[in-house]
Amino acid sequence: MRSGMMIDRRAMLGAVAAAAFAGAAPALGRGRERLGAVKGLIDSYVAAGRVPGAVVAVVRPGAFRPEYVMTGTTAFEGGTPVTPDTLWRLYSMTKPVTAMAVMQQVALGRLALDMPISEVLPEFTRMQVLVDPAKGLESRPAENPILLRHLLTHTAGFAYTINGNGPLEREYRRLGLQPGSSPAFLAPGDGPFPDLQGFLTALAGLPLLSEPGTSWRYSVALDVAGGLLERLTGNRLDAVLEAQLLRPLGMASSGFEVKPRQLSRLSSNYAWVELTGKPLDKPVFIDGPKRTDWLGPQKLLAGGAGMLASASDYARFAQMLLNEGLFQGRRIMPGGTVRLAMSNLMPAGVFYEGRNGFGAGGRVSLFDTLSAGPVGTPVGSYGWGGAAGTLFQVDPVREMAVVVMLQYLPQQRFELPKELQGALNRDFAAPERI
C-alpha cells in the first residue's frame, strides 16, 4: 500500500466494518453496481464454449452482502442454471484456506513462522537435497531446516508432479504422492494414494528438489502444512478446517467430498488437453454429478488441492480476509494475523515470478502496476487460483475481494487471470488521492 498522502485504507476499512456491523450500509466504491466488464468477460467464456457456466462474487468491507454475476449452466449438456450455491472444485484455491488455518495456530502461539517443522513433524528433521535433479536421486544433507514459513510460501524445496517428469517427480508418482489428483489422471505405474499421515511419512523419506528457503518452487508444501495441522491438533484435517474456519464462517457446503444430497448442485468439469498435454479443439467431460471422484470420503485429504466450495461459501472466506479477520461481527482471526498472512512472507531475496511476493498460500503484489498497463494490480493484492480456472483475490487498496468459479482444465489453457484483472480495472477505479 502506498504511503505518504494516500488515504489510510486500513483505518477506513475498520471504520466501515464497524458501521456495517452496527446496522449501517457499507460505503460502496465506484463499480459496485456495474461489474459490466466482469459480466462481459464471463459471458464471453460461455458464448465461446470454453465453459458451460460461471459465477463471480464480489464483496466490499463490512457486512456480508455479496454481489453475484452469473451466466450459463452447470454442464454443456443436461445442466441446470448456475447459482451462488453451485459446487466447484477448488484444487489449489484450497491452499489459502489451509494456510489461514495454520496462521490461526500461529496467532494462538502453538506455531511460529520461523520454527522448524520438525518440532511437530520429527520425520523431517534430517532432510536430503538432490545433487542434480535432472540426473537422479543422489543427494546430500540439507544445510537449512524446513521452516513453517517455507511451507506457506512454497520455499521448502518440495516438488509437484504437475510441474515436471524428473526423477523425483517420478518417485512421487510411484509412491502415490499426488494430492488433489484423481484416478482419472493416474498413469500406469502411479501408486495408490496414501492417507495424509502416510503421505508425510513417504515424502520425508525422499530428498528435496532444492535447499529450503532459497527459491520459490510450486509444490506439495501446503499439503504438508495440512498434515502438520493434523499432527498438532490430533484431529483429521477436515475436522480442523471445519472447527477453525468453515463452521465459524458458515461455509456449510465446503469440504473434501460431495455428499449424495449435494450432487444436483455439483458443476461438471472439462479438460481442454489430453493426458499427454496436447491441446484439444473441444473440451471433454472428466467429472460431474453422474460420475465424480469427489463422492464420499477421500483417503488423502489434500490441504493444497482437495476442497470443493460454492461461490457463496468462498466469498465468506474472502469477506473475512477483507475485513481483517471479522465476519458478521465475530472475530475469526486477529487483524494483525490477517495482515501478516496477506503480506510477503518469503525469505529475504526470494521472489515469485521475479517481482512478486508470496504470503500464506497466495501471491502478494509488491508493487503498484496499475499505471503500467490494463492488467496491472494494486500493491498489496493477495490471492490465488485453482487448476480448473477458479480465482480469488483480496484487494485492500480498492477495498474489494472477488471470487470466480468456473471449471476448465488446465488453467493455463486460457488467459483468464489477466483478462479478469483487466475487467476489474475497468469496473473498479483506482483509489483517489488527496
Image: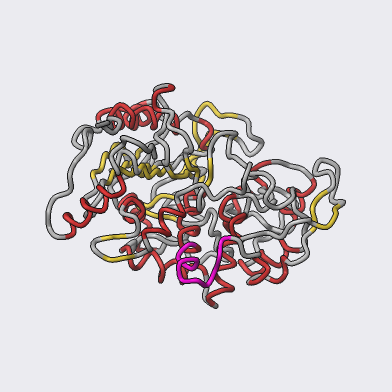
Can residue 253 be seen here? The reply is yes
Whether 328 is among the magenta residues is no
Whether 110 is among the magenta residues is yes
Q: What are the residue bounds of the magenta stretch?
A: 103-113
Q: Quadrant for the N terminus, please.
A: top left
Judged from this view, the residue extending furthest toward the left is 24
Can residue 74 be seen here? The reply is no
Residue 126 percent location from the top left of the image: 78, 65
Q: Nearer the viewer, residue 370 or 122?
A: 370
Residue 313 percent location from the top left of the image: 33, 55
Up/down of 253 relative to 131, above or below: below
Residue lying at 69% horizontally and 46% vertically, measured from the top left: 214
Judged from this view, the residue extending furthest toward the front is 4
Residue 23 percent location from the top left of the image: 12, 58
Residue 179 percent location from the top left of the image: 60, 56
Q: Is residue 182 left or right of residue 177?
A: left
Quadrant of the rendered structure where residue 200 is?
Answer: bottom right
Residue lying at 66% horizontally and 53% vertically, measured from the top left: 156
Q: Is residue 365 left or right of residue 354?
A: left
Q: Quadrant for the C terminus, please.
A: top left
Judged from this view, the residue extending furthest toward the bottom is 234
